[in-house]
Amino acid sequence: MQADKLKVTRLLKTARGQLDGILKMVEDDRYCIDISNQIMATQAILRNVNKEVLHAHLGGCVEEAFEKGDSHKKIQEIMDIMDKLAK
């Protein structure tokens, strides 16, 4: 993986902590809107992690594939990811 591992790890641990908090909120029958807000905050962290990983992929793996003249597979991978993100 080309991404900043410390940054990605920190963000993922934060998201994990938030998920644990959300589970506790559900178990404690907390207010639905509060739970929803925490879910959206966790999703935002995961979107940022994904962006970090994809940026690193483009700047590393994809760039290397273009330099080697083997870009078709990497372009298809990015197009597949873009399709998933658009859903």
Image (tube, rainbow, N blue to C red):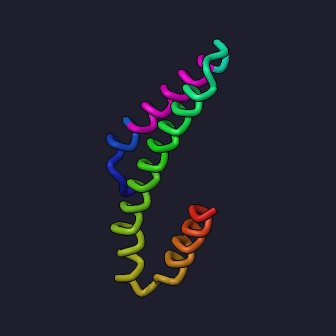
Q: Residue at x 47, y 37 (%)?
A: 41
In which quadrant is the C terminus drawn? bottom right
In which quadrant is the N terminus drawn? bottom left
Q: Please say if 69 is above or below 1.
A: below
Question: Residue 29 sits in which quadrant?
Answer: top right
Q: Is residue 68 left or right of residue 17?
A: left
Q: Work out whether residue 43 or residue 70 is closer to the camera in this orientation and state it.
A: 43
Q: Is residue 4 left or right of residue 19?
A: left
Q: Residue at x 36, y 45 (%)?
A: 5
Q: Residue at x 59, y 65 (%)?
A: 86
* Horizontal and vertical percent position of residue 14: 43, 31
* Horizontal and vertical percent position of residue 7: 33, 42
Q: Residue furthest bottom?
A: 69
Q: Which residues are magenta?
A: 11-25
* Horizontal and vertical percent position of residue 45: 44, 42
Q: Is residue 26 left or right of residue 55?
A: right
Q: Please say if 65 is above or below 57.
A: below
Q: Work out whether residue 81 or residue 72 is closer to the camera in this orientation and state it.
A: 81
Magenta span contains residue 20: yes
Q: Please say if 10 is above or below 87.
A: above
